[in-house]
Amino acid sequence: MLLFVDESGHDHGAMPCEVLAGVTVAEDQLWNLVRAVDSAEREYFGDYLRKLGDPERKGRKLLKRKRFRSANRAVTIPEEELPVLAYSTLTKGMTAKEQRADNSGVSERELVGYNRAVLKFVDEVLNIAARHSVEVIASVVDIEAPRPEPGLLRKDYVYLFERYFYFLETLPSRDRGLIVFDELEKAKAHILIQQMAEYFTKTDTGRYRSSRIVPEPFFVHSELTTGVFLADLTAYILGWGWRLGSMTQPRRNELRPFADKLHEMQFQGEKPHRDGKGVRDLYGIKYIGDLRGRFDREDQD
């Protein structure tokens, strides 16, 4: 089993939440999933995005606010015409970039058609993920959440691995979980690898969970890896569109339908109570209002 992981909002830019998001993909589903997403690109844009001068698929780019404003303009366009307009918009933009032209010559109709095609593509990608039994595991963190002293593996990672472990516990005992991250700067990757090693080898909980999770992660280029693209899209949508009743962070309502789909795709399982008596429900998406552990809080309160 593979867990593709990406993060969003950790640069403390515009997003109101930090999100560490993972999507589970079974090995026997991965190639079919990749082919389906590639097919959706051709269906909605007339060709692969990387061939149309737009190689980087990112949630913040695909789902920016002005795209929704453009898509909602009062321009009548038959649905079957959207891929033609999208292809024209992308090829004109690619030509203008190559020629360093100031104006691509894209018409309003083309731009509106392209933006509608993008939103339909994102919706279809989420549908494809659901059809291929993808499950969502994520930590959503308040941007103002108190932080522990640096050094140990952060609580959002611990919660992510906890849910991944209990997800793996629902599979046959021979199955193991691999973790695939979006590529980080080398120094940051070394720090994360070391923190994961400390957690999985030097804590009782980590050693127990290493029976199902392989503690050494892989790092890949997100623009080349469909699984990480799904994780990136998930992280961005959850950061702006997913809310529990107690959360007060601002929300982009136009992203709510996408967030609702991800909510339905989250892992749902059980975790034993600490006293060993019974179990409690466990949900794949976890909101975290405080990144400090119990001992951190006692030291600082």
Image: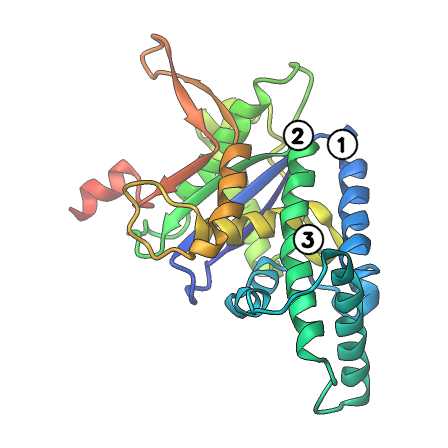
Amino acid type at mark 1: Gln
Which percent across, then down, holds residue 124?
Answer: 67, 46
Determine whether the residue tagged by mark 1 lies in a helix, strand or loop.
helix
Sequence-wise, which precedes: disc 3 or disc 2?
Answer: 3
- What is the spatial separation of the Cα atoms under label 3 and label 2, in whole angstroms? 19 Å
CA gap between label 1 and label 3 equals: 20 Å
C-beta proximity under 8 Å, tags 2 and 1: yes
Q: Who is closer to the viewer here, 168 or 293?
A: 168
Whether residue 30 is visible here, answered yes or no, is yes
Reading the chain from its start, which is encountered first: label 2 or label 1?
1
Residue furthest out toward the left: 301
Q: Position of residue 211 (x, y in %)?
A: 58, 22
Is the residue marked by circle 2 packed among few (<14), some (14-19), or many (20+) residues within 10 Å?
A: some
Residue 36 is drawn in which quadrant? top right
Residue 121, numbered label: 3
Q: CA distance from mark 2 to mark 1?
A: 8 Å
Q: Residues within 10 Å of mark 3 (few under 14, many from 20)?
A: many
Mark 3 vs mark 2: in front: 3
Q: Earlier in the sequence, mark 1 or mark 3?
A: 1
The residue that label 1 is drawn on is: 29
268 and 124: which one is in front? 124
Name the residue that disc number 2 marks. 133
Q: Secondary structure at mark 2?
A: loop
